[in-house]
Image: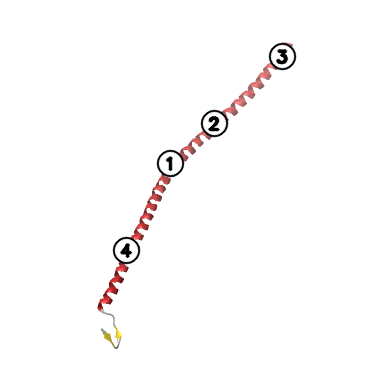
Amino acid sequence: FKERGENIWSFRSILWLVGSSLVVLCFSLGYYYLDNVRRDGELVQKNNALASELFVLEREKAILDEDFVLLKGNVQKLIEEKNVLEGQLLIMKETLQKTKEEKIIIEEKESRLIKN
């Protein structure tokens, strides 16, 4: 086909050009699609690994929180027992002091009786 002395592309050439363009476009889009699927797969694996690690850490935290509450209760009991024992120790010291004073008084009376 010629128009005013210029070559016009033939229908066949245009068909080959459009077909080649479509094939290149399909392969490019397919490559990008497959590459994104592969990357998404890696991200999903990382996400699943992090989610399972987070679950384990949250479970460990819950266990440690329970242990902390129990230990805190035990510490409170020990503090209460310590206070009770300190009170008993103070009473015993007072009793010992009174006994020593009574002993001194008795020894003084005894020494007076012996002198008389």
Mark-to-mark CA distance, 3 and 2:
40 Å
Of discs 3 and 4, which sits in the foreground? 4
Of mark 1 and mark 2, the one earlier in the sequence is: 1
Q: Is residue 10 left or right of residue 85?
A: left
Q: Residues within 10 Å of mark 2 (few under 14, many from 20)?
A: few
Q: Which mark is residue 30?
A: 4
The structure residue drawn at horizontal position 41% and vertical position 47%, both measured from the top left corner, is 53
Tell me the amino acid under the disc marked 2: Val
Give me the C-alpha separation between circle 3 and circle 4.
117 Å
Q: Which residue is mark 1?
A: 63
Q: Is residue 93 left or right of residue 44?
A: right
Q: SS class of the residue under badge 3?
A: helix
Amino acid type of the residue tagged 1 in the rendering? Ile
In the image, what residue type sits under mark 3? Ser
Q: Where, by quadrant of the figure, is residue 32 drawn? A: bottom left
- Depth check, front residue: 101 or 53: 53
- Residues 22 and 81: in front is 22
Location of the N terminus (image quadrant): bottom left
Q: Circle 4 — which element?
A: helix
What percent of the width, then of the height, locates residue 13?
27, 76
3 or 2: tag closer to the N-terminus: 2
Residue 18's x, y, as percent?
A: 29, 73
Q: Of helix, strand and loop, which one carries label 2? A: helix
Is 23 located above or below residue 108 in the figure?
A: below
Relative to 87, residue 30 above or below: below
Q: Do tag 2 and tag 4 residues touch (Cβ < 8 Å)?
A: no
Up the image or down, 41 lies above or below 75; here it is below
**Residue under pointer 2:** 84
| Residue assigned mark 3 | 111
Residue found at x 54% / y 31%: 84
Q: Nearer the viewer, mark 1 or mark 4?
A: 4
